[in-house]
Amino acid sequence: MKKLYSLFIGIDTYHPESKVTPLEGCRNDVAAMKDFLRDTYAKSFDLSPEITLLNDQATYANIVKCLGTHHLAKAGKDDVVLMYYSGHGTQEKAAPEFEKLDPTGLQESMVCYDSGLPGKYCLADKELRILLGTIQQQGAHLTLIFDCCHSGNITRSLDDTNNGKVRQFFFPEGTPARPYQSYLDGYFVKNFPQGPSSNQLPLASHILMTACDRQEKAFELKIQRGMFSYNLLKVLGNEPNISYADLYTRCQASMFRSVEKQHPQFETIAGFDPWNKFLNLGESTRGAQATYLLSANDKNQWNVNCGGVHGLSTELNKIAEFEILEQGSGKSLGRATTASVGFQDSTVVLNNNLALDMDRSYTAKLITLPAAPYAITLKATVKGKKRYDAYVKAQQAIGRAKLSPYFELIDGNVGGKYRVDLDQDVLDIYNQETNTLIKRFGGDDDDPIFKGTIEILDQIAKWEKNLALDNRNTQFNRNAFKITAKHSDTGQVLTGLSDPANPNTEVINVQVAKNLNGKYTLPLDLELKNAAGGTLFYKALYFSRKYGVMSLNGDYLTVDEIPAQDQYIQPQALEFDLDGGRKESSEIVKFIVSTVKINEEFLLEQEELEKLGETVEFWKERGRGVDLLANARDLVKKGQDKKAPANDWFCKTVVFKLTALASEVGKTPVQMGNGKIVVKGHDSFRANLALTSAGNSTRDINSVAPLPQILGWDNLVSLDTPSRDLYSATPDTLEISNLENDADLLNNPLQIELDAQLKAGEFILPLTFDGEDFLPVGTTRELADGKVEISIHEIPEVKSEGRSILRALKMCFFKVALGQEQNKLCWIEYVDGKPKYHDTGVKEKVASAKNILLVIHGIIGNTTEMAAAMGRAISSKTVDLVLAYDYENLNTSIEANSGKLKTALEAVGIKLDKKGKFNKKFSILAHSMGGLVSRHFIEQLGGRAVVSKLILAGTPSGGSNLSKVTKYRDTALFLLPLAVNVGLAIPAIATIMGILKGSKSLTASLEQMDYNHPGHFLKNLEQSSDPKIPYYVLAGHLDLFLETDNQAKRLVNKIFKNVANVFFDEPNDIAVGVDSIKHVPVKRKPAPVFFDVKCHHLNYFSLKESVDKIVDLLKK
């Protein structure tokens, strides 16, 4: 039996003097990986050659030792080696002698337990490369898995010239590069005194599986597991005999369901076959790979017609490998690797002295893992899923393994830009970011329906991938190619800001006025300047909103090359229209710039999709239906087929964000959106007004685009009548720009009247984004007939790191409603670490459980976040069942809710049996007012007989500011922006709005939290007899929390501009003072135990310190 030599490294806690921040899930990851291997492969391998290094065991010296002849290097030819690391990754300064390997002066490294101590270092990428070369000297199959940041290049050649915690650590700025002699105990000094070049170092054949792209972050889940490790094992658990190539695509898809900003990377190195089965179990599953043409160019270099546009990585450290075949016979001749990846072609080097005839052409088959397909969400009903599965099965029966090489439909995900909704006889394709319909297919004839869907999704995927295409590692100075846009009529230079997500994209916001013909038109002159020392060649592409890509060269731009130190000016180069009644548009022009001439045949161009937003029907008996809706045409005409560059190249993108100028603030009222919104006149304040759509917002510095994603499209108030064109978004954002005399608003606010059609229990929340935080805007007052008046006293400042633009306010209006009465006891199932509520089968679950935890929320919010946090208690087996009690917490007295809680618990068996006993451990975790409900149940209604312990978080046992007329408004104003920025649900935000308004529907429970209330609820509770059970009390300290969180401190400083500074008179968690939280009678046995925690009222269950403390208390 062959052996599996494994080395597991998991570091949650680093040396205290190293200053490396701790993690939570690394040891759990190691345990899960070991359990999986033992349960799955014990009959396939001798698993005994195993070493595990946890926390203080994982020193630099121990790791190097285990990577050598002490352990992994013992592996023989038929053995398999697995190295698994879970911990921090880092990017740090490399010794100057490695300049040939690290042109940037930086290296990727594993952070060891003692890294950062004097004379102790991280394990650097080049050290690991030497050690892997030693391990594979006898030919073992080598697999590496790294769940950390900055691991994407950790074993590569370095001169082949990124909702939870983050596994990323940077040493303090100014930390010097480590000495050259410290690398592998002097190995490099001895063998390469002047520093090595790449071809002098061994390169072991292996696969490197990493948690994320090097520019991304590796996240941890709340259940104390690494996002990558969790999903990797989830895929392997379903199919343990999978190939690495399939494991890659399925792991990508699995993670896409959970997080959009972390993409695992699998890299095959030195000829490793990605179609091998995981851990080399079974034959290679290599199928038909894409083939390309290998030929010699006029510089006697070998070229393959495959480049960045085909998905090859442009990273300096990620080479692609091809198998070279004889044309016709298909005989394998050898291999070649990329020396430089061009836009469409790549220069390759033949390996192992392979000699080929330069007058002939050869077939090149890509060996490297292909680029992951573009992920698109599939949201299907039960009947829709049956349709989809049947179609996929039919395609597989005729040899079509995948629907498309360009995209992958991922069932169950809620994120991503595009979504396919599928039901029994309807299929919709949506743009989720703009909340608009791209295409609707009706009928039951699935063959043409799915074929049409695949064609559209193919085009969308190619459009998106081509738009994102760039050479991140160009050696060329991008700023040497300068693009200037001017308004053709006025001569105004249009300036913008870099897209925060893509610094090579400039976003230019332009307000467009009507011309003499009554049209909103933007004519543009373009000035292109080459400040470089040589000629630059370029192609300009227009990416239309109908997913077309058209070349502008030859149609609008009459040249495609600019000599050194020269410029090209094209009058009226472009003209964009807001036609068809559109209020806004984003027009995208991408420049592909090359240092060599661009060929005439261009690959990226594609025709536009026809009639976006239309409905097409296919019925088995009725044939094709009619087009029910049509769209306006885009303005740029189709180009001719032309070609893209090779070798050194880069891209620059300009997005022109056009907004129709609607009107101006003056002394008379302005009606907008067919009268749905009225901006009142003002004596001195002046500004331009426009209506736009949040979903169409580009990611400029004060974009409101994320707001509907967070608070929900259904809650966003439309500011105009809906468009018949389903692909055009209805305006939902008021834009106020070109401000004059805005300081006058402080004493004379701008008033806006909105016809929101409010009902009882509903409020309007105006919000903006200032480039850093989401902020409520103005104050609101309900009027008659469901209307609301918003008074704006101040325009928030927009934070900008780029060029300044005109100050502007973009605001959305959200309708938030108080939650309906709902008293419900549920048991919690944890699916992929997320809580799933069940209100049936609770009694059966209670009967089979021995250690039960009940969570109860306060007046703000529900139990969702509490239940999610207590997944830790389940995964650590601290408890075996979590229950959640959600109740009507607004206009029902605390005593009444306590009685309903008792009834609900007794109904599921949490009560004394006939012998007067309750033989289970039953703990309660309560937040805020939920603690008063729990105390009343325990102390007044006999709950002490069944409750084992009570954990209180932020409970106002001595009263709350929310109940005091003098402070409730300031408290609510403080809580509101915090609630929005921490992502609380709409009912919770509505509760705070209701408190802010002094809503009578909230007074019943709020008034009881006044210590001096005539009903004496708190005083009566204080006089209760000793329940004789442990009480553990967590008291949040806002001031201590702000010392640890700079982002929260920044937000609080903004809030204090509008809120009286009453929150630091005494320690508090904002809603409740610390003294009040600790106002529990101490003369009890056992006495209550108090804990001070660094948090505020809304994040007791999202911060590690408080959650750790709660789980520890449950173990007592």
Image: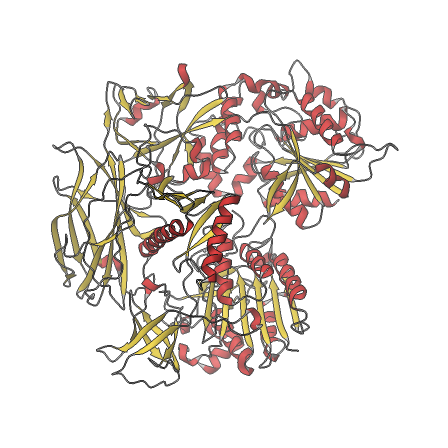
Q: Can you see residue 218? A: no
Q: Choose top left, top right, bottom left or bottom right for residue 777.
A: top left
* Camera-nearest residue between 1058 and 24: 24
> Residue at the location (18% across, 66% down)?
534
Where, quadrant-wise, is the C terminus in this rendering? top right
Does residue 28 lie above or below 1081 as drawn? Answer: below
Q: How is the image coloured?
A: secondary structure
Q: Can you see residue 339? A: yes
Residue found at the far right of this picture: 915
Residue found at the far front of this picture: 621
Does residue 41 lie above or below 685 as drawn? Answer: below
Where, quadrant-wise, is the N terminus in this rendering? bottom right
Does residue 604 lie above or below 338 as drawn? Answer: above
Q: Is residue 611 left or right of residue 389?
A: left
* Camera-nearest residue between 708 and 729: 729
Q: Choose top left, top right, bottom left or bottom right for residue 626.
A: top left
Where residue 834 appears, as percent x and y from the top left, is: 58, 45
Q: Is residue 710 left or right of residue 537?
A: right
Q: Is residue 487 left or right of residue 764?
A: left
Where residue 703 appears, as percent x and y from the top left, is: 35, 39
Where residue 619 appears, as percent x and y from the top left, is: 39, 44
Where residue 659 appears, as percent x and y from the top left, is: 25, 36
Q: Is residue 792 left or right of residue 1040?
A: left
Tally of marks: 0
